[in-house]
Image (cartoon, coloured by chain):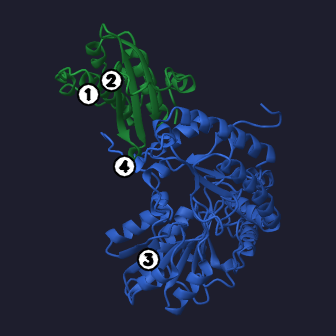
Chain colours: A blue, B green
Amino acid sequence: MKSGLKFPIYLDYSATTPVDPRVAEKMIPYLTEHFGNPASRSHAFGWKAEEAVEEARAQVAALVNCDPKELVWTSGATESINLALKGAAEFYKTKGRHLVTVKTEHKATLDTMRELERRGFEVTYLDVDGEGLVDLNALEAALRKDTILVSVMYVNNEIGVIQDIPAIGEICRRRGILFHVDAAQATGKVDIDLGALKVDLMSFSAHKTYGPKGVGALFIRRKPRVRLEPQIHGGGHERGFRSGTLPTHQIVGMGEAFRIAKLEMGAERERIRALSRRLLEGIREIEEVYVNGSLERRVPHNLNVSFNFVEGESLIMAVKDIAVSSGSACTSASLEPSYVLRALGRSDELAHSSIRFTLGRFTTEEEIEYTVAHLKTKVAKLRDMSPLWEMYKEGVDLNSVQWAAH
Amino acid sequence: MAYSSKVIDHYENPRNVGSFDKSDPSVGTGMVGAPACGDVMKLQIKVNEQGIIEDARFKTYGCGSAIASSSLATEWMKGKTLEEAEKIRNTQIAEELALPPVKIHCSILAEDAIKAAIADYRRKHGLAPQKDASRDERKVA
């Protein structure tokens, strides 16, 4: 074991990120000292908390170039997505009942869309190409006179591909259709300019960008004005969009995290690009390895790779010194492989043999070198145990085999 | 996913990984499962003239529980007659390895692999296939 390495090595930044120590430090006083309710207008405790909330709101707005008044605090991107989709669908349902999204969206979007279907809306789920990208012509063709909302994620959580949000925004705006973007995985990784993007609603998460879990935000454009039916009722907080006492410490955390992201994103992206290049180089020295998703239109933080003839869960067990995630069925509750990898057209076998590596702010060169060496050893060991590898080496065409499945 | 120490042991130190020559008359080969399901097991037995399984080998494409189930199967089969080996139940494998409910199917596949290897050996030697009494009482946890 090399000195300086802490095990397990964390390479699952897309699942969540550690709170940046600077963020944690900023948050703590708001737990025990400045604990006032930001809605308390009559005393200094409240004023102080409100000040902190508005400062944070401005910090988030600064990262994405929008008006702070256009941001509503939520408990996280999942809630933001629910508010955006249900809120808009219910408000504009007299205009039309057709919604469009993509098969590779996060479950927060897909499951909300299913719920809207149960409520009588019609949803089109667009396919993606083999690289994971939406075909703009197919998108345009899917839009109808009764389409009221399109939802596409900026950066995919499993494969890290970046959709052409500017172009999709243009298409939607031309037709007067609302456009929602799930940007949970995008903040701190790609530049987001809501001054230029024709996006009406955008969902943000704190814990994907070195902020705390349990807080997020929803951008709701004011010009042209977007209307939503609130989903959580109560004291009318956040201009009626989302009732509930604001968690000052959480919000301060998100603000500080986004402030740091704006400052450090450029340099961080380049540092991570170099690391992920090295990781890919190393992984490519292994035979029969497939990268899932476009390499060009992708955030450098994400590398999703299938190791043919080796099963994903056994691979994760093999690299247990490294925290990663797999698109393998065994690691999800059902026995089905990742729907994102399936949507790319990946065979079940390759979907089963996939590992997602996501790098982040605290990833080091040493960790990457260890990972590369470790992978080579373990993949070789598992292939020695694999009947499929044996058959491949013997020149057997596995597609021609009659399997005795149970 | 938390694995039992026995599963981890079989995974770290698998017993009897490898292959026999399929064409060898004393060898029976069973291949079960499918890549699309994420589980493929190849189990081979070497049977001596007394009808005793003197050696066994496995190769498995599958999760830790699948690898452990097939590794354990090869351990248990050694020294048994074909009839005795056929009596190995998936429930015994699952119990020995403390498999959680979501992994029971790995033990079932291992039991299938054992039977397939034995059936293959029998077929090669023109022996009548045994009536598979176990299928009626197969338990799925």
Q: Residues within 10 Å of mark 4 (few under 14, many from 20)?
A: few
Q: CA distance from mark 3 to mark 1?
A: 46 Å
Mark 3 against mark 1, which lies toward the viewer?
Answer: 1
Q: CA distance from mark 2 to mark 1?
A: 7 Å
Q: CA distance from mark 2 to mark 4?
A: 33 Å
Q: Amino acid at mark 3?
A: Val
Quickly name the residue at label 1.
Answer: B139
Q: Quadrant of residue A290?
A: bottom right
Q: Residues within 10 Å of mark 1 (few under 14, many from 20)?
A: few
- Give a yes or no on whether discs 1 and 4 share a subunit: no
Q: Position of residue B20 (x, y in %)?
A: 44, 24
Q: CA distance from mark 4 to mark 3?
A: 38 Å
Q: Please give the chain letter of the residue carrying mark 4.
A: A
Q: Please give the chain letter of the residue carrying mark 3.
A: A
Q: Looking at the image, can residue A85 be seen? A: yes
Asked if the residue under mark 2 is in contact with the one under mark 3, i.e. CB atoms within 8 Å, the reply is no
Q: Residue at x 46, y 40 (%)?
A: A391
Q: Which mark is residue A400?
A: 4
- SS label for mark 4: helix
Q: Position of residue B57 (x, y in %)?
A: 44, 23
Q: Residue at x 53, y 80 (%)?
A: A179
Mark 4 against mark 3, which lies toward the viewer?
Answer: 4
Q: Amino acid at mark 4?
A: Ser
Is B62 located above or below residue A22 in the figure?
Answer: above
Q: Which mark is residue B91?
A: 2
- Give a yes or no on whether discs 3 and 1 share a subunit: no
- SS label for mark 1: loop
Q: Which mark is residue A100?
A: 3
